[in-house]
Image (cartoon, rainbow, N blue to C red):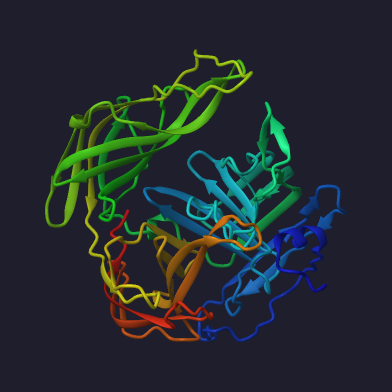
Amino acid sequence: MLNINSSVAVLTASLILSACGSDNHQSKENNSTSSTPFTTEFKSNLTLQKDSDPIIQISGRRSNQNDDVNAYSVTHRFYRGSSSIILIYNFDKSDINKTLHINYDPILKKVLSVSIGKTYLTKLNINSSNNNSLACSDSILFEACKNINVKFDEKTGNSEINFENLKLSNTPTITITPVNTLDSVQLPPINKSYTYLTGKISGSLSIPAQTFENIRKTSQINMSVNQKSISPIDAIYDPETKEILFSSYADNWIDSGLKPTNFTTSIENTITKYALVEAETLHGFSGACMSFVVSTRIKDVASIQASDNTNDISLKFNQSIYQDNTIPPLFPNIPIQQTCATTFIQLDGVVKVNKPLTQLQITPTFKNGENRTVVQPALYFDVINHNQQRFGNNTIQIELKNNKIEKINFKDFLIGVDSSTGLLKRFEYNFTCDAAQSCQGISYSPKDNQLKFSNTALFYKGEHPELNKNIHINGIFDFAGR
Protein backbone atom coordinates (compact mmCIF):
# COMPACT_ATOMS: atom_id res chain seq x y z
CA MET A 1 0.00 0.00 0.00
CA LEU A 2 1.28 3.42 -0.85
CA ASN A 3 1.98 6.02 1.77
CA ILE A 4 -1.03 8.30 1.35
CA ASN A 5 -1.34 11.86 2.59
CA SER A 6 -4.25 12.25 4.98
CA SER A 7 -6.01 15.03 3.13
CA VAL A 8 -9.12 14.17 1.20
CA ALA A 9 -7.86 15.89 -1.92
CA VAL A 10 -4.85 13.59 -2.08
CA LEU A 11 -7.06 10.62 -1.29
CA THR A 12 -9.06 11.16 -4.44
CA ALA A 13 -5.95 11.73 -6.52
CA SER A 14 -3.77 8.84 -5.42
CA LEU A 15 -5.73 6.35 -3.32
CA ILE A 16 -4.74 2.74 -3.99
CA LEU A 17 -6.36 0.24 -1.65
CA SER A 18 -6.27 -3.52 -1.51
CA ALA A 19 -8.61 -5.85 0.32
CA CYS A 20 -7.34 -6.38 3.83
CA GLY A 21 -8.37 -8.73 6.60
CA SER A 22 -8.37 -8.03 10.31
CA ASP A 23 -4.97 -7.79 11.96
CA ASN A 24 -6.13 -8.98 15.39
CA HIS A 25 -3.96 -6.29 16.97
CA GLN A 26 -4.44 -5.18 20.57
CA SER A 27 -6.97 -2.36 20.90
CA LYS A 28 -7.08 0.24 23.63
CA GLU A 29 -9.74 -1.84 25.35
CA ASN A 30 -9.14 -5.60 25.37
CA ASN A 31 -12.30 -7.19 24.03
CA SER A 32 -10.89 -10.71 23.80
CA THR A 33 -13.18 -11.81 26.63
CA SER A 34 -16.29 -10.94 24.63
CA SER A 35 -18.51 -14.00 24.31
CA THR A 36 -19.67 -13.04 20.81
CA PRO A 37 -17.00 -11.93 18.30
CA PHE A 38 -18.01 -8.87 16.31
CA THR A 39 -16.99 -8.30 12.71
CA THR A 40 -17.86 -5.64 10.16
CA GLU A 41 -17.23 -5.76 6.44
CA PHE A 42 -17.89 -3.94 3.23
CA LYS A 43 -17.56 -5.18 -0.34
CA SER A 44 -16.91 -2.73 -3.13
CA ASN A 45 -16.48 -2.21 -6.83
CA LEU A 46 -16.66 1.53 -6.21
CA THR A 47 -14.52 3.89 -8.28
CA LEU A 48 -13.55 7.52 -7.67
CA GLN A 49 -12.40 10.04 -10.23
CA LYS A 50 -11.33 13.58 -9.42
CA ASP A 51 -11.97 15.92 -12.35
CA SER A 52 -10.06 14.30 -15.27
CA ASP A 53 -7.54 12.40 -13.10
CA PRO A 54 -7.11 8.61 -13.46
CA ILE A 55 -9.89 6.44 -12.05
CA ILE A 56 -9.23 4.96 -8.59
CA GLN A 57 -10.65 1.60 -7.48
CA ILE A 58 -11.86 1.17 -3.87
CA SER A 59 -11.51 -2.39 -2.56
CA GLY A 60 -13.42 -3.96 0.31
CA ARG A 61 -12.26 -4.22 3.90
CA ARG A 62 -13.00 -6.27 7.04
CA SER A 63 -12.56 -5.53 10.74
CA ASN A 64 -13.18 -7.22 14.08
CA GLN A 65 -13.92 -6.19 17.67
CA ASN A 66 -10.24 -5.53 18.42
CA ASP A 67 -9.83 -2.93 15.67
CA ASP A 68 -9.99 0.74 16.60
CA VAL A 69 -11.68 1.69 13.30
CA ASN A 70 -14.59 -0.36 11.97
CA ALA A 71 -14.63 -1.17 8.27
CA TYR A 72 -18.38 -0.53 8.31
CA SER A 73 -20.65 0.95 10.94
CA VAL A 74 -24.22 2.16 11.36
CA THR A 75 -25.23 5.18 13.44
CA HIS A 76 -28.81 6.05 14.35
CA ARG A 77 -28.72 9.76 15.17
CA PHE A 78 -31.14 11.99 17.06
CA TYR A 79 -30.38 15.73 16.95
CA ARG A 80 -32.55 18.60 18.18
CA GLY A 81 -35.84 16.87 17.48
CA SER A 82 -34.99 15.14 14.18
CA SER A 83 -33.47 11.78 13.27
CA SER A 84 -31.45 10.10 10.52
CA ILE A 85 -29.23 7.08 9.87
CA ILE A 86 -25.55 7.42 8.96
CA LEU A 87 -23.89 4.55 7.05
CA ILE A 88 -20.10 4.68 7.35
CA TYR A 89 -17.44 2.88 5.27
CA ASN A 90 -13.78 3.33 6.21
CA PHE A 91 -11.37 2.74 3.32
CA ASP A 92 -8.16 2.73 5.38
CA LYS A 93 -8.01 1.72 9.07
CA SER A 94 -4.92 3.90 9.59
CA ASP A 95 -6.63 7.09 8.36
CA ILE A 96 -10.16 8.11 9.36
CA ASN A 97 -10.08 10.93 6.80
CA LYS A 98 -10.58 8.23 4.16
CA THR A 99 -14.13 7.45 5.24
CA LEU A 100 -17.37 7.56 3.24
CA HIS A 101 -20.48 8.78 5.11
CA ILE A 102 -24.05 8.43 3.84
CA ASN A 103 -26.60 10.45 5.86
CA TYR A 104 -29.99 8.88 5.12
CA ASP A 105 -33.60 9.66 6.08
CA PRO A 106 -35.35 6.26 6.44
CA ILE A 107 -38.86 7.77 6.45
CA LEU A 108 -38.51 9.74 3.22
CA LYS A 109 -35.96 7.22 1.88
CA LYS A 110 -33.84 10.19 0.90
CA VAL A 111 -30.08 10.79 1.03
CA LEU A 112 -29.47 13.98 3.03
CA SER A 113 -25.73 14.17 2.42
CA VAL A 114 -22.72 12.16 1.25
CA SER A 115 -19.21 13.03 2.37
CA ILE A 116 -15.68 11.66 2.33
CA GLY A 117 -13.71 12.93 5.30
CA LYS A 118 -13.16 12.65 9.03
CA THR A 119 -16.82 12.94 9.96
CA TYR A 120 -20.28 13.18 8.44
CA LEU A 121 -21.83 16.56 7.68
CA THR A 122 -24.05 18.16 10.30
CA LYS A 123 -25.42 21.66 10.78
CA LEU A 124 -22.73 22.07 13.43
CA ASN A 125 -19.74 21.32 11.20
CA ILE A 126 -20.85 21.98 7.62
CA ASN A 127 -19.28 25.45 7.65
CA SER A 128 -16.28 24.49 9.77
CA SER A 129 -12.92 25.35 8.25
CA ASN A 130 -11.52 22.30 10.06
CA ASN A 131 -13.83 19.94 8.18
CA ASN A 132 -12.01 19.24 4.91
CA SER A 133 -14.60 17.07 3.17
CA LEU A 134 -15.72 16.08 -0.27
CA ALA A 135 -19.48 16.21 -0.16
CA CYS A 136 -22.91 16.64 -1.66
CA SER A 137 -25.85 17.94 0.36
CA ASP A 138 -28.75 20.39 0.36
CA SER A 139 -26.36 23.05 1.69
CA ILE A 140 -25.60 25.92 -0.68
CA LEU A 141 -21.89 25.05 -0.29
CA PHE A 142 -22.25 21.77 -2.20
CA GLU A 143 -24.04 20.11 -5.10
CA ALA A 144 -27.32 18.29 -4.38
CA CYS A 145 -26.99 14.51 -3.96
CA LYS A 146 -28.18 12.85 -7.18
CA ASN A 147 -27.72 9.45 -8.83
CA ILE A 148 -27.54 7.43 -5.62
CA ASN A 149 -29.76 4.57 -4.43
CA VAL A 150 -29.78 3.24 -0.85
CA LYS A 151 -31.02 -0.12 0.41
CA PHE A 152 -30.90 -0.49 4.20
CA ASP A 153 -32.12 -3.39 6.36
CA GLU A 154 -33.19 -2.01 9.75
CA LYS A 155 -33.25 -5.49 11.33
CA THR A 156 -29.64 -6.35 10.51
CA GLY A 157 -27.96 -3.02 9.82
CA ASN A 158 -26.78 -4.28 6.42
CA SER A 159 -26.74 -1.88 3.48
CA GLU A 160 -26.21 -1.63 -0.27
CA ILE A 161 -25.47 1.68 -2.02
CA ASN A 162 -25.43 2.15 -5.79
CA PHE A 163 -23.75 5.21 -7.34
CA GLU A 164 -24.08 6.41 -10.92
CA ASN A 165 -21.62 9.28 -11.27
CA LEU A 166 -22.54 10.85 -7.94
CA LYS A 167 -20.95 14.31 -7.92
CA LEU A 168 -19.02 15.45 -4.84
CA SER A 169 -17.24 18.76 -4.41
CA ASN A 170 -14.73 20.13 -1.95
CA THR A 171 -15.65 22.92 0.46
CA PRO A 172 -15.21 26.07 -1.64
CA THR A 173 -12.13 28.15 -0.82
CA ILE A 174 -12.13 31.88 -1.46
CA THR A 175 -8.99 33.90 -2.14
CA ILE A 176 -8.59 37.50 -1.03
CA THR A 177 -8.00 39.27 -4.36
CA PRO A 178 -11.29 39.69 -6.33
CA VAL A 179 -10.99 38.90 -10.04
CA ASN A 180 -14.45 37.90 -11.27
CA THR A 181 -17.15 40.41 -12.07
CA LEU A 182 -20.94 40.32 -12.13
CA ASP A 183 -22.63 43.47 -13.43
CA SER A 184 -19.42 45.42 -12.73
CA VAL A 185 -19.28 44.13 -9.13
CA GLN A 186 -16.01 42.41 -8.23
CA LEU A 187 -16.36 39.01 -6.57
CA PRO A 188 -13.68 36.87 -4.92
CA PRO A 189 -12.67 33.81 -7.00
CA ILE A 190 -13.97 30.50 -5.68
CA ASN A 191 -11.78 27.42 -6.09
CA LYS A 192 -13.75 24.21 -6.46
CA SER A 193 -13.04 20.70 -7.74
CA TYR A 194 -15.28 17.68 -8.30
CA THR A 195 -15.02 13.96 -7.61
CA TYR A 196 -17.35 11.36 -9.11
CA LEU A 197 -18.41 8.08 -7.46
CA THR A 198 -19.56 5.13 -9.57
CA GLY A 199 -20.33 1.53 -8.64
CA LYS A 200 -21.65 -0.36 -5.64
CA ILE A 201 -20.62 -0.68 -2.00
CA SER A 202 -22.34 -2.99 0.50
CA GLY A 203 -21.81 -3.25 4.26
CA SER A 204 -22.64 -5.97 6.79
CA LEU A 205 -22.49 -6.44 10.58
CA SER A 206 -22.15 -9.78 12.38
CA ILE A 207 -24.35 -8.43 15.22
CA PRO A 208 -27.43 -6.30 14.39
CA ALA A 209 -27.09 -2.58 15.06
CA GLN A 210 -28.98 -0.64 17.70
CA THR A 211 -31.97 1.34 16.42
CA PHE A 212 -33.90 4.46 17.39
CA GLU A 213 -35.66 2.31 20.00
CA ASN A 214 -32.36 2.29 21.92
CA ILE A 215 -32.45 6.09 22.28
CA ARG A 216 -34.35 7.08 25.40
CA LYS A 217 -37.90 8.25 24.66
CA THR A 218 -39.53 10.61 27.19
CA SER A 219 -41.70 13.05 25.21
CA GLN A 220 -45.46 12.60 24.87
CA ILE A 221 -46.98 13.95 21.69
CA ASN A 222 -50.45 13.99 20.16
CA MET A 223 -50.37 16.33 17.18
CA SER A 224 -51.93 16.97 13.79
CA VAL A 225 -50.72 19.06 10.86
CA ASN A 226 -53.37 20.48 8.54
CA GLN A 227 -55.88 18.28 10.38
CA LYS A 228 -53.91 15.08 9.67
CA SER A 229 -52.20 13.10 12.43
CA ILE A 230 -48.41 13.11 12.22
CA SER A 231 -46.02 10.33 13.19
CA PRO A 232 -43.21 9.64 14.02
CA ILE A 233 -42.18 12.67 16.03
CA ASP A 234 -39.61 13.45 18.72
CA ALA A 235 -39.08 16.47 20.97
CA ILE A 236 -36.49 17.98 23.30
CA TYR A 237 -36.14 21.04 25.56
CA ASP A 238 -33.07 23.29 25.66
CA PRO A 239 -33.08 25.38 28.88
CA GLU A 240 -30.18 27.53 27.67
CA THR A 241 -32.22 28.97 24.79
CA LYS A 242 -35.57 28.19 26.48
CA GLU A 243 -36.70 26.44 23.29
CA ILE A 244 -38.77 23.31 22.74
CA LEU A 245 -37.71 21.60 19.51
CA PHE A 246 -39.67 18.91 17.67
CA SER A 247 -40.01 17.57 14.16
CA SER A 248 -42.50 15.81 11.94
CA TYR A 249 -43.16 14.68 8.38
CA ALA A 250 -46.11 16.53 6.96
CA ASP A 251 -47.89 17.73 3.83
CA ASN A 252 -47.18 21.46 3.94
CA TRP A 253 -49.32 22.30 0.89
CA ILE A 254 -46.58 22.89 -1.66
CA ASP A 255 -47.22 19.46 -3.20
CA SER A 256 -48.75 16.13 -2.20
CA GLY A 257 -45.61 14.60 -0.69
CA LEU A 258 -44.44 14.48 2.93
CA LYS A 259 -41.77 16.99 3.91
CA PRO A 260 -39.58 17.18 7.01
CA THR A 261 -40.69 20.06 9.24
CA ASN A 262 -38.79 21.30 12.28
CA PHE A 263 -40.65 23.35 14.89
CA THR A 264 -39.09 25.70 17.45
CA THR A 265 -41.09 27.31 20.26
CA SER A 266 -39.51 29.68 22.77
CA ILE A 267 -41.17 30.06 26.17
CA GLU A 268 -40.34 32.02 29.30
CA ASN A 269 -42.44 31.81 32.48
CA THR A 270 -45.12 29.92 30.48
CA ILE A 271 -45.36 32.80 27.99
CA THR A 272 -44.68 32.01 24.33
CA LYS A 273 -42.03 34.45 23.09
CA TYR A 274 -41.89 33.21 19.49
CA ALA A 275 -42.58 30.12 17.40
CA LEU A 276 -41.36 29.18 13.96
CA VAL A 277 -41.14 26.24 11.58
CA GLU A 278 -38.27 25.34 9.27
CA ALA A 279 -39.81 23.78 6.18
CA GLU A 280 -39.59 23.55 2.43
CA THR A 281 -41.38 26.17 0.36
CA LEU A 282 -41.40 27.33 -3.28
CA HIS A 283 -40.29 30.69 -4.69
CA GLY A 284 -40.30 31.80 -8.31
CA PHE A 285 -37.00 32.51 -10.06
CA SER A 286 -36.30 32.70 -13.81
CA GLY A 287 -39.82 31.60 -14.66
CA ALA A 288 -39.72 28.45 -12.51
CA CYS A 289 -40.73 27.48 -8.97
CA MET A 290 -37.62 26.57 -6.99
CA SER A 291 -37.53 24.78 -3.64
CA PHE A 292 -36.05 26.49 -0.58
CA VAL A 293 -35.96 25.60 3.11
CA VAL A 294 -37.01 28.68 5.07
CA SER A 295 -37.96 29.59 8.63
CA THR A 296 -41.53 30.84 8.94
CA ARG A 297 -42.94 32.50 12.06
CA ILE A 298 -46.31 31.67 13.56
CA LYS A 299 -49.13 34.13 12.81
CA ASP A 300 -50.33 34.37 16.42
CA VAL A 301 -48.21 33.29 19.41
CA ALA A 302 -51.36 33.44 21.57
CA SER A 303 -52.54 30.25 19.84
CA ILE A 304 -49.92 28.35 21.88
CA GLN A 305 -50.47 27.83 25.60
CA ALA A 306 -47.60 26.62 27.81
CA SER A 307 -47.70 24.93 31.21
CA ASP A 308 -44.72 24.14 33.42
CA ASN A 309 -44.10 21.90 36.42
CA THR A 310 -41.10 20.39 38.19
CA ASN A 311 -40.40 17.58 35.70
CA ASP A 312 -41.79 18.65 32.33
CA ILE A 313 -43.17 21.37 30.07
CA SER A 314 -46.29 21.13 27.89
CA LEU A 315 -47.35 23.11 24.84
CA LYS A 316 -50.93 23.15 23.57
CA PHE A 317 -51.42 24.28 19.95
CA ASN A 318 -54.88 25.49 18.94
CA GLN A 319 -55.15 26.21 15.21
CA SER A 320 -51.61 27.56 15.26
CA ILE A 321 -50.87 28.72 11.72
CA TYR A 322 -47.48 29.05 10.03
CA GLN A 323 -47.66 30.56 6.53
CA ASP A 324 -44.77 31.59 4.29
CA ASN A 325 -45.37 35.11 2.98
CA THR A 326 -41.73 35.80 2.18
CA ILE A 327 -41.13 38.09 -0.79
CA PRO A 328 -38.20 36.68 -2.81
CA PRO A 329 -35.21 39.02 -3.13
CA LEU A 330 -34.71 40.98 -6.35
CA PHE A 331 -31.71 40.10 -8.53
CA PRO A 332 -30.58 41.93 -11.70
CA ASN A 333 -31.83 40.39 -14.96
CA ILE A 334 -33.69 37.55 -13.17
CA PRO A 335 -37.47 37.62 -13.63
CA ILE A 336 -39.58 36.64 -10.63
CA GLN A 337 -42.59 34.38 -10.84
CA GLN A 338 -45.16 35.03 -8.09
CA THR A 339 -47.53 32.08 -8.58
CA CYS A 340 -45.67 29.35 -6.65
CA ALA A 341 -47.31 27.38 -3.84
CA THR A 342 -45.87 28.26 -0.43
CA THR A 343 -45.85 26.59 2.97
CA PHE A 344 -49.06 26.56 4.98
CA ILE A 345 -49.17 24.59 8.23
CA GLN A 346 -51.92 24.47 10.85
CA LEU A 347 -50.74 22.78 14.03
CA ASP A 348 -53.10 21.33 16.66
CA GLY A 349 -52.48 19.17 19.70
CA VAL A 350 -50.16 18.78 22.68
CA VAL A 351 -46.40 18.27 23.13
CA LYS A 352 -44.95 17.35 26.54
CA VAL A 353 -41.16 17.27 27.04
CA ASN A 354 -38.95 16.18 29.91
CA LYS A 355 -36.86 18.79 31.73
CA PRO A 356 -33.11 18.07 31.75
CA LEU A 357 -31.06 18.28 34.96
CA THR A 358 -27.82 19.59 33.46
CA GLN A 359 -25.97 22.01 35.75
CA LEU A 360 -22.19 22.20 35.40
CA GLN A 361 -19.44 24.34 36.87
CA ILE A 362 -16.30 24.46 34.72
CA THR A 363 -12.97 26.11 35.51
CA PRO A 364 -11.43 28.48 32.91
CA THR A 365 -9.89 27.14 29.69
CA PHE A 366 -7.98 30.39 29.09
CA LYS A 367 -5.56 31.65 31.75
CA ASN A 368 -7.29 35.01 31.89
CA GLY A 369 -10.76 33.44 31.77
CA GLU A 370 -13.47 32.96 34.38
CA ASN A 371 -15.37 30.00 35.77
CA ARG A 372 -18.49 29.24 33.78
CA THR A 373 -21.84 27.62 34.45
CA VAL A 374 -23.39 25.39 31.77
CA VAL A 375 -27.09 24.47 31.68
CA GLN A 376 -27.39 23.22 28.09
CA PRO A 377 -27.96 19.42 28.11
CA ALA A 378 -27.13 16.91 25.41
CA LEU A 379 -29.02 17.87 22.25
CA TYR A 380 -27.93 14.84 20.22
CA PHE A 381 -27.74 11.13 20.95
CA ASP A 382 -26.11 8.59 18.63
CA VAL A 383 -26.21 4.80 18.91
CA ILE A 384 -23.48 3.08 16.89
CA ASN A 385 -23.53 -0.59 15.88
CA HIS A 386 -24.61 -2.83 18.78
CA ASN A 387 -22.70 -1.43 21.78
CA GLN A 388 -21.58 2.19 21.37
CA GLN A 389 -23.23 5.51 22.20
CA ARG A 390 -22.37 9.19 21.86
CA PHE A 391 -24.26 12.13 23.26
CA GLY A 392 -23.62 15.82 23.79
CA ASN A 393 -23.88 19.28 22.26
CA ASN A 394 -21.52 21.62 20.45
CA THR A 395 -19.47 22.08 23.65
CA ILE A 396 -19.48 18.75 25.50
CA GLN A 397 -19.21 15.31 23.90
CA ILE A 398 -19.46 11.93 25.69
CA GLU A 399 -18.44 8.58 24.14
CA LEU A 400 -19.44 5.22 25.65
CA LYS A 401 -18.89 1.56 24.89
CA ASN A 402 -20.91 -1.14 26.65
CA ASN A 403 -22.32 1.68 28.82
CA LYS A 404 -18.84 2.63 30.09
CA ILE A 405 -17.26 6.04 29.54
CA GLU A 406 -14.48 5.92 26.93
CA LYS A 407 -13.96 9.62 26.31
CA ILE A 408 -15.16 13.02 27.50
CA ASN A 409 -14.40 16.13 25.45
CA PHE A 410 -14.96 19.81 26.21
CA LYS A 411 -14.58 22.17 23.25
CA ASP A 412 -13.75 25.85 23.50
CA PHE A 413 -13.05 28.20 20.60
CA LEU A 414 -11.61 31.56 19.66
CA ILE A 415 -12.30 33.63 16.54
CA GLY A 416 -9.07 34.87 14.98
CA VAL A 417 -7.38 35.66 11.68
CA ASP A 418 -6.05 32.75 9.62
CA SER A 419 -2.50 33.75 8.67
CA SER A 420 -2.65 31.72 5.44
CA THR A 421 -5.81 33.40 4.07
CA GLY A 422 -6.19 36.63 6.03
CA LEU A 423 -9.79 35.64 6.76
CA LEU A 424 -11.52 35.15 10.09
CA LYS A 425 -11.40 31.56 11.33
CA ARG A 426 -12.84 29.62 14.24
CA PHE A 427 -9.96 28.04 16.19
CA GLU A 428 -11.08 25.11 18.36
CA TYR A 429 -9.39 23.84 21.53
CA ASN A 430 -10.29 20.45 22.99
CA PHE A 431 -9.89 19.30 26.60
CA THR A 432 -10.31 15.54 27.04
CA CYS A 433 -10.00 12.52 29.24
CA ASP A 434 -9.73 9.10 27.59
CA ALA A 435 -7.65 5.91 27.61
CA ALA A 436 -4.41 7.92 27.57
CA GLN A 437 -5.43 10.17 30.49
CA SER A 438 -8.22 8.38 32.30
CA CYS A 439 -11.53 9.95 33.29
CA GLN A 440 -11.69 10.22 37.09
CA GLY A 441 -14.47 11.34 39.42
CA ILE A 442 -17.39 10.32 37.19
CA SER A 443 -20.46 8.10 37.49
CA TYR A 444 -22.91 7.25 34.72
CA SER A 445 -26.54 6.08 34.81
CA PRO A 446 -27.49 4.32 31.53
CA LYS A 447 -31.16 4.37 32.53
CA ASP A 448 -31.29 8.17 32.78
CA ASN A 449 -28.39 8.98 30.40
CA GLN A 450 -27.02 11.06 33.25
CA LEU A 451 -23.35 11.74 33.96
CA LYS A 452 -22.15 13.11 37.32
CA PHE A 453 -18.80 14.91 37.59
CA SER A 454 -16.83 15.29 40.82
CA ASN A 455 -13.81 17.53 40.20
CA THR A 456 -13.17 15.65 36.94
CA ALA A 457 -10.02 16.78 35.12
CA LEU A 458 -9.91 17.23 31.33
CA PHE A 459 -6.58 17.84 29.62
CA TYR A 460 -5.40 20.01 26.73
CA LYS A 461 -2.87 17.99 24.74
CA GLY A 462 -1.44 20.77 22.61
CA GLU A 463 0.74 23.76 23.35
CA HIS A 464 -0.81 27.20 23.65
CA PRO A 465 0.57 30.03 25.80
CA GLU A 466 -2.88 31.40 26.67
CA LEU A 467 -4.53 28.07 27.61
CA ASN A 468 -4.52 26.19 30.90
CA LYS A 469 -3.20 22.64 30.65
CA ASN A 470 -6.34 21.24 32.28
CA ILE A 471 -9.81 22.18 33.47
CA HIS A 472 -12.08 20.70 36.16
CA ILE A 473 -15.81 19.95 35.92
CA ASN A 474 -18.41 19.48 38.67
CA GLY A 475 -22.13 18.79 38.40
CA ILE A 476 -24.57 16.89 36.17
CA PHE A 477 -24.75 16.49 32.40
CA ASP A 478 -27.66 14.55 30.89
CA PHE A 479 -29.77 13.67 27.88
CA ALA A 480 -33.39 14.19 28.94
CA GLY A 481 -34.75 11.96 26.19
CA ARG A 482 -36.32 12.47 22.81
* Left or right placement of residue 417 versus residue 71 in this view: left
Side of 284 where 406 appears, left or right: left
Estimate the x, y position of residue 448 in percent, counting from the top left: 27, 66
Q: How many marks?
A: 0
Q: Quadrant of the N terminus?
A: bottom right
Q: Tell me what residue is drawn at x 41 percent, y 54 percent.
A: 78
Q: Residue at x 22, y 39 (%)?
A: 273
Residue 474 in view, yes or no: yes
Horizontal and vertical percent position of residue 33: 51, 86
Q: Is residue 258 visible?
A: no
| 138 or 328, nearer to the observer | 328
Residue 250 image position (x, y, % from top left):
40, 32
Residue at the (66%, 62%) spot, across then down: 420
Residue 53 at x, y = what percent?
86, 52
Residue furthest out toward the right: 54
* 260 or 369: nearer the viewer: 369
